[in-house]
Image (spheres, rainbow, N blue to C red):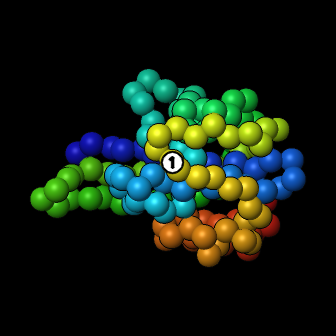
Amino acid sequence: MENRVVQKAFLHNAQGKYLFLKRSAYGARPSEWDLPGGRMDPGETLDEALSREIEEETGITGVKNPKLVYAQSHVRNDEEAQYNYVLLLFISETGKTDVTLSGEHQEYTWLYLKDAVDLVQHPLHKESIQRIIDNDLE
């Protein structure tokens, strides 16, 4: 069974706001708010994969101090697909606020985490935001 490692970043700027991306109207989870990140490619380190995905999706380079704050895994084994899904969520810093979106997303916003709880729809992202807030990990 294949392992799919997906990394996402709670990427914050100097004002303490975090970047959220609205997915395109097509593909998986259309028009949902999401975090920058994606799948790890073979041969990449965690830092390399996270930096690459953030740059591809936002144009932001020079992400600093990624800290792992949440990890979750589950097995999908049905008629459509079979794989072990591993989600790693990091908090990272950037000095940049200008975003150049890829075709994967249609919109972006910078928000304080407390304001993002109701924005995101993915249950793991909601849970991780609440854990970050509750444990003062910002």
Helix, strand or loop status at disc 1: strand
Does any portion of residue 25 appear in the rendered image? yes
Q: Position of residue 16 (x, y in %)?
A: 83, 55
- In the rendered view, would you say 19 is above or below 135? above
Residue 8, position in %: x, y?
Answer: 56, 49
Q: Where residue 77 sits in the image (x, y, percent)?
A: 20, 59
User: Residue placed at 58% from the left, 40% from the top?
Assistant: 101
Q: Which residue is mark 1?
A: 105
- Left or right side of 22 for 110: right
Residue found at x 51% / y 48%: 105
The total of numbered circles placed on residues is 1
> Which residue appears farthest toward the right when viewing the image?
15
- Which residue is farthest top? 43
Q: Which residue lies at the image location 34% right of the left edge and 52% below the top edge?
A: 27
Q: Crowding at label 1, few (<14), some or many (≥20) Cα neighbours within 10 Å?
A: many
Tell me: 61 left or right of 21.
Answer: right
Which of these two is toward me, 10 or 56?
Answer: 56
Quadrant where the image shows the C terminus = bottom right
* Image quarter of residue 61: top right
Q: Residue at x 54, y 44 (%)?
A: 37
Question: Is residue 83 placed above or below 63 in the rendered structure?
Answer: below
- Judge whether residue 50 can be spotted in this image: no
Instruction: Between residue 98 and residue 89, name the one nearer to us.
Output: 98
Q: Nearer the viewer, residue 103 or 62?
A: 103
Where does the N terminus fall, quadrant-wise? Answer: top left
Q: Which image quadrant for residue 18? A: bottom right
Amino acid type at circle 1 is His
